[in-house]
Image: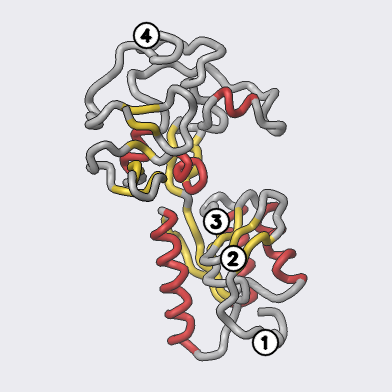
Amino acid sequence: MVRASGAGPTDSVETPVDEELLRGTCPACQAVIGDAHRDDCDVAECLATGRKRMWCRAQPGTAGHDCGRADWTGRWPAHAEAREFGWHVRWDVEARRFVRCAPDVEGSGPDLSRLYENARWDQAARRWVRRRAVLFSRAVRGGRATIEELTKQARRYCAEQGYEVVGEHVGARGWREAVADVDEGKADVVVVPSLERLGFGKQVFERVDAVRAAGGRVAGPGLRVGADGRVVASTSTEHEEDPRGDR
């Protein structure tokens, strides 16, 4: 048996993985295919968030909501999507930790931690889907060549995270369009190539708040924004310059 990264107590998979092989009963509550999981089953998923039902009940923001009726389908929840996206992990004996790998690696299992972080739960479809990203950079000196290099950096980051790039925006007008994309449900993440390309000083926090208010998040290479909207980590590779006007 192989433990899946981010999994619960019974969240393991048999190897090799066979997508066509169905398990007749839930390994935790013994529900048969088509029957509802028992209320205290730690395999059952929440139909509102996609996470484990027991996880939802432990979170302040979701503890009281209706998780819906989840039936045992014969397959572990979320494992099919992790395999589809190519997000698996294996145990590295020498490093003594899980490392990312392809789904066809023997002994690997789904990387659920990555799935929960970088994918989005589609409640209507009842499955995980890739997050959609729009790229943004404030206006920069250096012309098209500089913008193209920054775009490459942002696209590499999106590829690493598994985001689907659905648009690119530059400058003040581009920022308004990026936020609109999130607000209209066209994108989930605004990706910037660096903190400096998002803005300066107070503008950074205002822009992060604007995206959060629209229902999305801001991310990028070396940039990490906490759950409260604060920038908790950033790697600066550029010298700051005074912005001229609204960029």
Q: Earlier in the sequence, mark 1 or mark 4?
A: 4
Do the residues under discs 1 and 4 have CB atoms within 8 angstroms? no
Q: Earlier in the sequence, mark 2 or mark 4?
A: 4
Identify residue for label 3: 189
Query: Quick one: label 3, few (<14), some, or many (20+) residues within 10 Å?
Result: many
- Viewer-nearest of discs 3 and 2: 3
Between the residue at mark 1 and the residue at mark 4, the CA separation in whole angstroms equals 63 Å
Q: Amino acid at mark 4?
A: Val
Q: Earlier in the sequence, mark 3 or mark 2?
A: 2
Residue at image location 48% in from the left, 37% down from the top: 6
Residue at image location 67% in from the left, 87% down from the top: 241
Q: Earlier in the sequence, mark 3 or mark 4?
A: 4
Q: Earlier in the sequence, mark 2 or mark 1?
A: 2
Q: Position of residue 110 (x, y in %)?
A: 37, 37
Residue at image location 39% in from the left, 32% down from the top: 3
In the displayed structure image, the side of residue 211 where residue 20 appears, left or right: left
- Viewer-nearest of discs 2 and 1: 1
Identify residue for label 4: 32
In the displayed structure image, the side of residue 247 where residue 206 appears, left or right: right
Q: Mark 1: which secondary structure?
A: loop
Q: Against 198, is 58 above or below?
A: above
Q: Against 101, is 52 above or below?
A: above
Q: Amino acid at mark 1?
A: Glu
Between the residue at mark 3 and the residue at mark 4, the CA separation in whole angstroms equals 38 Å
Between the residue at mark 3 and the residue at mark 2, the CA separation in whole angstroms equals 13 Å
Between 236 and 184, the residue placed more toward the observer is 236
Between the residue at mark 2 and the residue at mark 4, the CA separation in whole angstroms equals 48 Å
Q: Using the rendered view, name the quadrant where residue 164 is placed.
A: bottom left
Q: Position of residue 37 (x, y in %)?
A: 47, 13
Q: Mark 3: which secondary structure?
A: strand
Identify residue for label 2: 177
